[in-house]
Image: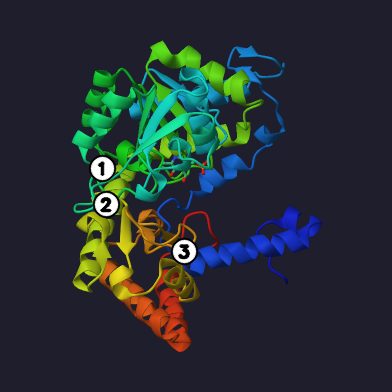
Amino acid sequence: MTPTPRHPALSATDPDLAALVGAEERLQAETLRLIPSENYVSSAVLEASGTVLQNKYSEGYPGRRYYEGQQVIDQVERLAADRAKALFGVEHANVQPYSGSPANLAVYLAFAEPGDTVMGMALPMGGHLTHGWSVSATGRWFRGVQYGVRQDTGLIDFDAVREMALKERPKLIFCGGTALPRTIDFAAFGEIARESGALLVADVSHIAGLIAGGAHPSPVPYADVVSTTTHKTLRGPRGAMLLSREEHAKAIDKAVFPGLQGGPHNQTTAAIAVALHEAARPSFRDYAHAVVANARALADELLARGFDLVSGGTDNHLVLIDLTPKQVPGKIAAKALDRAGIVVNYNTVPYDTRKPFDPSGIRIGTPSLTSRGLSTDHMATIADWIDRAVTAASKDDEPALTAIRAEVAALMSAFPAPGLPA
Ligand SMILES: Cc1ncc(COP(=O)(O)O)c(C=O)c1O
């Protein structure tokens, strides 16, 4: 008897697409996924995001919709928003942004006018495109001024940030980013925002799960708006949320809808609700702390093997490696690691002398491997693989990469991933 396919309807209707989904499942099962913005969602989150809630149009907000038939959807959205409020300790949660970039755009629409000065961390220093970087709409439609980290420490220089804020008087100051391995001092940013008359936007997309699990301080007491994706350390579906005090609720809601978006993606809202429910459990606290413990252990093992880490290590889920001393460009290393079954992304490092599409670093993180149950005991092995693969990349040693790939697959087969076939 042939086994029932994992996605029977999909396999019957569109075998080509079903085969691609199966191939991606195998890739995600067999490889060591170290991209710090990725994760494995639970089967419950996957199920919620594939429900008939997908079939409903719901422009507006619970109790104030432009379409009828919202008896159930209103409850779903209220549940998600209430769970977000409880988990992060905020007065208001908008769970409709389609993703992190539109969430940030909504913040601009709510609180700034085109041409206004906005301040954020520069992209090559670890900030995000949507924090006013030149190629982004936020840098074209607003006047972006950008801060960075100190070259000698890799840490934010708050005297320089204060000086810039007092000189430029931005409407918004963004803190948070995509390649920041250290704890963000939200209190210091809050003080600077108050002194300069700016609103503080804490973009915690990368660390939302760590905050929910008590493994990183919360920005809530200091930030006017907290923006976050839901699909990174928070382990939810691809989506986003904007959190704030009640005083900003109206402006944010108006900016998300009708300002920027039409109907919310109700199946995603449902999956966000499930992820928030999971993140409120005691086991998620263990997960968040394990993510950090694993990242610290991995950083230590890499340092012991002579790797140069930006800021000298990590406080969170992410490690940024400057490969300049290893004389292997980030892109070549990332592609070699991929062939070895270790998935990372190449990344600029602060003050990079190479181009963003061919930078000096790679960025790695521990959210996904921790979701599979790997512990600090495994970090020496992983650091060893990275070391061997980077060395192999420098010598074009393809057999070495093939050998590592087999070792990776063997270890990963002992740690089934959430949401994937066992
Ligand atoms: C800090 C930060 N903000 C915003 C975003 C944008 O999120 P999305 O890719 O969902 O638009 C990201 C994604 O990498 C991010 O890291």
Disc marking residue 330: none
Q: Which residue is mark 2?
A: 292
From the Cβ of disc 3, is ligand 1 less than 8 Å away?
A: no
Q: Estimate the x, y position of residue 339 in percent, counting from the top left.
A: 50, 75
Q: Which residue is mark 3?
A: 358
Q: CA distance from mark 3 to mark 1?
A: 33 Å
Q: Residues within 10 Å of mark 3 (few under 14, many from 20)?
A: some
Task: Say what secondary structure mark 2 lies in.
Answer: helix
Q: Residue at x 35, y 42 (%)?
A: 207
Q: Estimate the x, y position of residue 45 in percent, counting from the top left.
A: 52, 43
Q: Estimate the x, y position of residue 340 in percent, counting from the top left.
A: 45, 76
Spot the residue most to the front.
167
From the Cβ of disc 1, is ligand 1 less than 8 Å away?
A: no
Q: Nearer the viewer, mark 3 or mark 2?
A: 3
- First along the sequence among labels 3 and 1: 1
Q: CA distance from mark 3 to mark 2?
A: 28 Å
Q: Amino acid at mark 3?
A: Asp
Q: Residue at x 52, y 54 (%)?
A: 419
- 419 or 304: nearer the eye? 304
- 258 or 175: nearer the eye? 175
Q: Which residue is mark 1?
A: 215
Left or right relative to 404: residue 45: right
Left or right relative to 28: residue 319: left
408 shown above or below 375: below
Q: Amino acid at mark 2?
A: Val
Task: Say what secondary structure mark 3 lies in.
Answer: loop
- 379 or 284: nearer the eye? 379
- Rendered image quadrant of residue 205: top left
The count of marks equals 3
